[in-house]
Image (cartoon, rainbow, N blue to C red):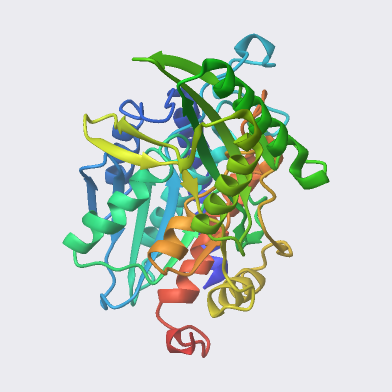
């Protein structure tokens, strides 16, 4: 079986790389995916997916139906990118899709247009192989992940898939893992600290004291990837002076959002106490965002920490499948999230919808959100084959004694 999959994969590789280049060539900053969605939709139709649709959130979904609707594997990558910064410092155009020394360069190449191309073509490889599937495969190219905090994934799981009568049993993220199997990461909060009072000097003193307290970190040095505090904003309204302090804070798996907010409010109130009578509140930042198709939604800026047991049957089966398929030795791990604000949809999938999730993608984390972002072309094509092997191990008709009922 694996020899046949490898041969069919090699036939698709050139087309898959061209598709990855095409994706990079289309600018798709978060909440502005309107130009890239038709490209993904057309490619899925061209590759013969059983059903292709665009939902109310603007996600593009391709489905391969199995003969048993009780089990579904969800493949997920996002179509959006972070905003382009310092284009003049890139070695080549961030929208050219240039391949140089085996690397595909461009904004979003690593995070995660290379992964998206691999997942779309993994579905195509399954279709082309004619291997019968017990369960369904859903390939979802979602919106508003980078800026919208996985708004697209929530829309997919709350509305689109239930309306189709589909419930994912497992999820595979095509985010950058360097073809390792990743099973979680820390989260983060965007917080607003509000200070107000009738005396402008007291409000300013209290604001400075709060910032000093948070920077002090109870005497512990705070690294930039743990906490970021922006300059406060002051406004006057009808005799009331108001200050807003915006913060990004890392959220550990063992931390609960409500407890973190309560602790921060207590610390802020204590720091402001000596400045006089001022009111202090600490809230998660919220905003109304408009998706590319005109839909609006209220976003709470929280990325939940998440963790799938590294010995979960999903990960165990994925590791076995990759080994049996002759893929390079797979390393397990977790995303490090070296910069605040990075994350994946894994927190939504696991903590809000209880879907066992693993990451397997061609990019590497260090090349995401940076100048000269790139992904190894060979890893895109390897990811097609590897992802297909994982899917078949989960919902394919048993081969050589393996049975899907074992997990």
Is 235 rendered above or below residue 168?
A: above
**Residue furthest toward the left?**
163
Q: Position of residue 105 (x, y in %)?
A: 62, 27
Q: Position of residue 59 (x, y in %)?
A: 30, 43
Q: Which of 237 and 226 is in front in this view?
A: 237
Q: Nearer the viewer, residue 186 or 130?
A: 186
In this rendering, does residue 362 appear at all?
Answer: no
Is 350 rendered above or below residue 279?
A: below
For image coordinates 37% across by 54% down, the residue present is 139
Q: Which of 283 and 343 is in front in this view?
A: 283
For image coordinates 55% across by 29% down, the residue present is 245
Q: Position of residue 23 (x, y in %)?
A: 45, 31
Q: In this view, does 391 lie to the left or right of 72?
A: right
Q: In this view, does 356 lie to the left or right of 39?
A: right
Q: In this view, does 159 lie to the left or right of 370?
A: left
For image coordinates 52% across by 39% down, the residue present is 190
Q: In this view, does 126 lie to the left or right of 83?
A: left
Q: Which of 290 and 97 is in front in this view?
A: 290
């Amino acid at each position: 079986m694996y020899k046949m999959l490898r041969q069919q994969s090699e036939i698709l590789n050139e087309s898959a790389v061209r598709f990855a280049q095409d994706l990079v060539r289309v600018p798709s900053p978060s909440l502005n995916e309107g130009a890239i969605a038709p490209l993904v939709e057309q490619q899925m139709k061209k590759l013969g997916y059983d059903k292709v649709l665009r939902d109310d959130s603007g996600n593009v979904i391709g489905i391969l139906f199995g003969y048993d609707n009780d089990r579904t594997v969800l493949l997920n990558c996002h179509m959006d990118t972070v905003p382009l910064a310092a284009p003049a410092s890139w070695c080549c155009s961030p929208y050219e899709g240039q391949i140089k020394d085996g690397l595909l360069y461009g904004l979003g190449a690593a995070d995660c247009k290379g992964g998206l191309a691999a997942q779309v073509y993994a579905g195509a490889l399954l279709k082309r192989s004619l291997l019968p599937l017990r369960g369904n495969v859903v390939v979802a190219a979602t919106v508003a992940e980078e800026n919208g905090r996985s708004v697209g994934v929530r829309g997919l799981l709350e509305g689109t898939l239930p309306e189709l009568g589909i419930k994912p049993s497992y999820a595979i993220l095509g985010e950058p893992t360097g073809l390792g199997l990743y099973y979680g990461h820390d989260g983060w909060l965007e917080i607003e600290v509000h200070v107000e009072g009738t005396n402008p000097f007291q409000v300013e003193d209290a604001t400075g004291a709060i910032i000093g307290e948070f920077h002090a970190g109870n005497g512990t040095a705070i690294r930039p990837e743990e906490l970021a505090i922006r300059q406060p904003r002051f406004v006057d309204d009808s005799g009331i002076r108001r200050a807003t302090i915006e913060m990004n804070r890392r959220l550990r798996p063992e931390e609960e959002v409500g407890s973190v907010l309560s602790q921060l409010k207590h610390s802020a109130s204590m720091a402001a106490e000596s400045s006089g009578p001022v009111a202090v509140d600490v809230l998660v930042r919220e905003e109304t965002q408009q998706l590319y198709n005109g839909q609006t939604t209220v976003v709470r800026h929280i990325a939940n920490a998440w963790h799938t047991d590294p010995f979960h049957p999903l990960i165990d089966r994925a590791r076995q499948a990759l080994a049996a398929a002759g893929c390079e030795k797979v390393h397990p791990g977790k995303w490090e999230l070296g910069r605040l604000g990075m994350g994946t949809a894994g927190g939504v999938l696991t903590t809000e919808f209880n879907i066992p999730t693993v990451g397997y993608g061609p990019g590497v984390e260090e090349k995401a959100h940076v100048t000269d972002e790139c992904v190894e072309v060979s890893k895109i094509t390897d990811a097609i084959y590897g992802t297909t092997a994982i899917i078949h191990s989960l919902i394919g008709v048993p081969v050589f004694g393996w049975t899907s009922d074992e997990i």
